[in-house]
Amino acid sequence: MRQSRTMSLVEAVANVLVGYWLAVLTQIVVFPWFHLPARLNDALGLSAIFTIISLARAYLMRRLFERLCRS
């Protein structure tokens, strides 16, 4: 069964949203171990930047593999 482009995007968004909140929580917990400030606003912003990159990567990788499987 092939996955549509829309479902590829839905899957990528769901995956990245879970990753976003996991990254925020991880930063709040782990940053103090490295003597870095663990401010919520910083964690939210930093995670947002990486989330955008991750969303684009996940979608593009899914489309690449869909194309490879079609061949």
Image (cartoon, rainbow, N blue to C red):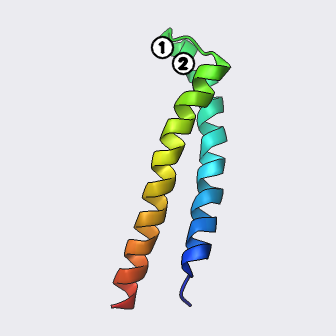
60 versus 2 height, above or below: above
Residue located at (46% from left, 70% from top): 62
Q: Quadrant of residue 12?
A: bottom right
Q: Quadrant of residue 14?
A: bottom right
The amino acid sitting under disc 1 is Phe
Residue 17 position, x and y percent, is 65, 49
Residue located at (55% from left, 34% from top): 47
Query: Helix or strand or loop: what does disc 1 sit on?
Result: helix
Residue located at (34% from left, 82% from top): 68
Asked if labels 2 and 1 touch by Cβ distance under 8 angstroms, the answer is: yes
The amino acid sitting under disc 2 is Phe
Query: Helix or strand or loop: what does disc 2 sit on?
Result: helix
3 versus 19 height, above or below: below
Q: Is residue 56 left or right of residue 18?
A: left
What label sits on residue 34 in the rendered view?
Answer: 1
2 versus 15 height, above or below: below
Mark 1, other Cα within 10 Å: few <14 / some 14–19 / many ≥20: few
Give the camera-side residue of 25 and 5.
5
Mark 2, other Cα within 10 Å: few <14 / some 14–19 / many ≥20: some
Q: Please give the residue where the numbered disc 2 appears in the rendered image.
A: 31
Residue 23 position, x and y percent, is 59, 36
| C-alpha gap between disc 1 and disc 2 | 5 Å
